[in-house]
Image (cartoon, rainbow, N blue to C red):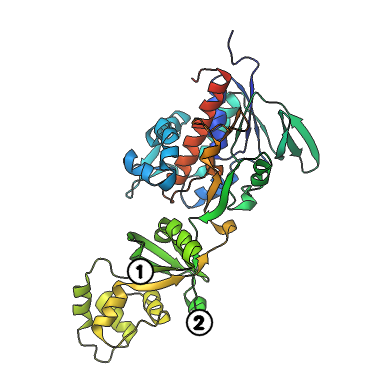
Amino acid sequence: MDKAVGRRVAVIGGGPAGLMAATVVAAAGVAVDLYEAKPTVGRKFLLAGRSGLNLTHAEPLDTFLDRYGPAKARMAPAVEAFPPDSLRAWLADLGVETFVGSSGRVFPVGMKAAALLREWLRRLAGLGVVVHTRHRWVGFSDGRLRFQRDGIETIEVAADATVVALGGASWPRMGSDGAWVGLLAAEGVAVAPLKPANCGFEADWSPIFADRWEGAALKNIAATFAGRTVRGEITVTRHGLEGGPVYALGAALRDAIETTGDAVLVIDLKPDLDLAQVEARLARPRRRASLSNFLRKTLGLTGVAVALLRERRCIPDDGAALAACVKGLAVPLLRPRPLAEAISTAGGVRFSELDDQLMLIRRPGVFVAGEMLDWEAPTGGFLLQGAFSTGWWAGRGALNWLGVTAR
């Protein structure tokens, strides 16, 4: 007799990890009910896709796995089992072609999250997955799952296995509000504190600088912290700085501030020139040009770059000292911006609470996937790949628990 017959799996959470877990389980012939607290699924996924849906990255897998930092060893089985190439093949089977951008990032050809999600939901419907929206998970009741339906009625549901994929606590209006932390803590499950990741950081700007330069971009710069340098573009915000290099260095910046209360980001405003070249250009006669015009003409510094030098009181008269400021402008950062503003979340269910298939040791038959797990990664496709891979892995784990062969 087919072991899939009569079995039912509950997937809690309609983001990428939950949808992938539902896909894997349903494809094996097991009935799946997917529960989502919001009126629709994939809300954060759709929002992330507004600026171009960066699904994964094409860099070699060994380098790719390094992006998960301290969680690399625990993330590796899931990512190696369902790597970027497998994700792209699965998307192609879904009818979504992808391409690799100049930076190695992978995007759908149409660049639209809505089209991808629409095809995915069509596939799930064809597999018989039943989606229950406006169902907020509120905990366990003996061997059953409790949901608050439509914000009023509480119901209990039985499942032979469960995959929980409720995200972190960033962008709570999209559904990832971290409410699950208390529910799992009540079961004795250890959860690493949720912290902002891929977020902006605050700096002590003067009101004049913040008013004038909010939203301005420092382009083609290099940012350094704790011995690591990342090139790219940083945006000045009213509160501080954000952008790719800040996100990439964010974990180290955040942890340093937590530990010592101090983190100084060093910005090279002209990374394509060495110090001697900058000094040589600054040694040219200035004549009657204002300092701003002189720096613009000799070094190509934009208005915001010059303003930042002034803000940091780093406009010395001596050319060599000014060159040193241009090549290594120190910007003290005070704290990360609030978790609700972050792109993603660090912390989550500790891997020590899980077996090698992401099943809770304290709750056999309950698997955890996605951003609920204690890992973080920079933007660039590594976040979504982690969600897809752990969702796939948890779905496979649920099938193994049921004794059902994956297809």
Q: Earlier in the sequence, mark 2 or mark 1?
A: 2
Residue 138: x and y, percent? 72, 40
Residue 129: x and y, percent? 62, 27
Q: Secondary structure at mark 2?
A: helix
User: Looking at the rendered structure, which numbered label has been put on residue 245?
Assistant: none
Residue situated in front as seen by the camera: 369 or 131: 369
Given the image, on which type of amino acid does mark 1 rest?
Ile
Q: Is residue 317 left or right of residue 190?
A: left
Residue 39 visible in rendering: no
Q: Is residue 219 left or right of residue 205?
A: left
Q: Which residue is mark 1?
A: 267
**Count of residue discs:** 2
Which quadrant does the N terminus fall into? top right
Given the image, on which type of amino acid does mark 2 rest?
Ile
Q: Is residue 188 left or right of residue 378?
A: right
Residue 237 higher or lower than 65, as above or below: below
Would you call the spot at circle 1 few (<14 residues within 10 Å), some (14-19), or many (20 or more)?
many
Residue situated in front as seen by the camera: 208 or 351: 351
Q: Secondary structure at mark 1?
A: strand
Q: Are marks 2 and 1 in contact (CB under 8 Å)?
A: no
Would you call the spot at circle 2 few (<14 residues within 10 Å), some (14-19), or many (20 or more)?
few
Residue situated in front as seen by the camera: 380 or 96: 380
Q: Residue at x 81, y 38 (%)?
A: 153
Q: Is residue 98 left or right of residue 287?
A: right
Residue situated in front as seen by the camera: 38 or 247: 247
Residue 32 lies in what quarter of the image? Answer: top right
Residue 58: x and y, percent? 34, 41
Q: Which residue is mark 2?
A: 208
Residue 324: x and y, percent? 28, 76
